[in-house]
């Protein structure tokens, strides 16, 4: 990845942070974009103290104009864009599908699908010929987890976005793939073991991990770095003939044919 340029959204935490570290560790210049500039800057600092080259940028991926401007800005600054990793995402609302209102659905779609559409478009425009786009999906699509429809419906769309774009952009040598994480220990999952005051509760953590690990053949949650390793693979030349695919990083929790 030496001297290649990568934009990673959601780079302030979890899978995005680990992906920034992985790509920078392989030699890429990494733009760490996140809604939270402070955590994005922490990621850049973590990368840079290890000898990598990373820069932080505040970016709300639900702001299509800002997302496009950020990608164009990176291309203008470095003269190239090789990798776009659309990692930012979150559960924006929970509850039965029957009681979802328009706001719930709109927030889920804006963050977990539309931002990826716009991120892919912006990247494809500046990449020209050659490049790799990696979208982050979710195992909730395979498992149809209850109460998460406003999250899993957009995430299902990410798979189709990936397939459609892979077909469109293949002739330009741009590969597009999805990484679909299972149960990964990140800021997102840590929200489940906070006590009433918002502090992490170790007993709640143990119980939640035990509960979630049932049915995972590898018997444990994944680490962000284990997802980032697959992002790095898809970003690089080792995956030169891989496009339009979804790679599940889930400890075997679902194994579709
Ligand atoms: N952790 C899991 O178990 C799991 C499972 C399946 C899929 N995922 C997906 O992995 C991706 C990364 O999640 P994570 O688990 O690392 O969570 P995380 O909460 O640790 O990190 C998500 C990051 O995205 C950023 N973000 C949120 N909204 C944003 C916005 N509008 N603009 C820019 N940045 C924004 C947050 O500030 C945060 O830094 C998400 O797309 C998530 O849906 C995670």
Image (cartoon, rainbow, N blue to C red):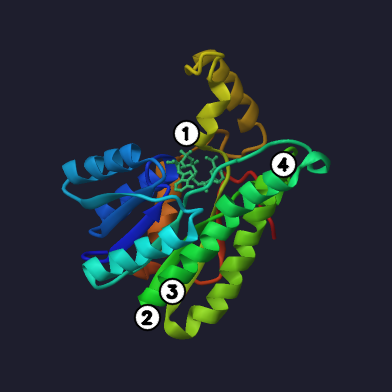
Q: Nearer the viewer, residue 99 or 160?
A: 99
Q: Earlier in the sequence, mark 4 or mark 1?
A: 4
In the rendered structure, find residue 145 and report the number of the disc placed on it: 4
Marks 4 and 1, Cα distance to the nearest angstrom?
19 Å
* Quadrant including the N terminus: bottom left
Marks 2 and 3, Cα distance to the nearest angstrom?
7 Å
Taking the spot 51% from the left edge, 13% from the top edge, the residue there is 197
Pointer 1 local density, CA inside 10 Å: few below 14, some 14–19, many at least 20:
few
Where disc 4 sits, the SS reads loop
Residue sticking out furthest to the right: 98
Taking the spot 53% from the left edge, 20% from the top edge, the residue there is 194
Q: Earlier in the sequence, mark 1 or mark 3?
A: 3
Front disc: 4 or 2: 2
Residue at mark 1: 187
Where, by quadrant of the figure, is residue 80 drawn?
bottom left
Q: Nearer the viewer, residue 255 or 118?
A: 118
Q: Is residue 176 above or below residue 42?
A: below
Where disc 2 sits, the SS reads loop
Residue at mark 3: 124
Q: Is mark 1 within 8 Å of ligand 1?
A: yes
Marks 3 and 4, Cα distance to the nearest angstrom?
32 Å
Q: Earlier in the sequence, mark 4 or mark 2?
A: 2
Front disc: 1 or 3: 3
Q: Nearer the viewer, residue 80 or 175?
A: 80
Residue at mark 2: 128
* Quadrant including the C terminus: bottom right
Residues marked 1 and 3 touching at CB (< 8 Å): no
Where disc 1 sits, the SS reads helix
Front disc: 4 or 1: 1
Q: Is residue 177 above or below residue 212?
A: below
């Amino acid at each position: 990845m030496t001297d290649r340029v990568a934009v990673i959204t959601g780079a302030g935490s979890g899978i995005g942070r680990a992906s920034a570290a992985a790509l920078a560790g392989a030699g890429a210049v990494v733009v760490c974009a996140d809604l939270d500039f402070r955590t994005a800057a922490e990621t850049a600092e973590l990368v840079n103290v290890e000898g990598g080259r990373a820069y932080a940028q505040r970016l709300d991926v639900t702001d299509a104009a800002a997302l496009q401007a950020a990608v164009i800005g990176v291309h203008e600054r470095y003269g190239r864009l090789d990798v776009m990793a659309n990692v930012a995402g979150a559960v924006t609302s929970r509850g039965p599908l029957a009681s979802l209102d328009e706001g719930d659905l709109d927030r889920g779609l804006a963050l977990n699908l539309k931002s990826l559409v716009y991120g892919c478009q912006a990247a494809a425009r500046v990449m020209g010929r050659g490049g790799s786009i990696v979208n982050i999906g979710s195992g909730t699509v395979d498992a149809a987890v209850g109460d998460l429809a406003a999250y899993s419906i957009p995430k299902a769309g990410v798979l189709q976005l990936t397939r459609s774009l892979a077909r469109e952009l293949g002739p330009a040598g741009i590969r597009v793939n999805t990484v679909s994480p299972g149960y990964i220990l990140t800021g997102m999952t840590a929200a489940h073991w906070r006590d009433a005051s918002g502090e992490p509760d170790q007993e709640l953590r143990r119980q939640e991990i035990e509960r979630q690990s049932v049915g995972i053949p590898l018997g444990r949650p994944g680490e962000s770095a284990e997802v980032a390793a697959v992002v790095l693979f898809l970003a690089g030349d080792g995956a030169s003939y891989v496009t339009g695919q979804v790679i599940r990083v889930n400890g075997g929790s679902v194994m579709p044919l």
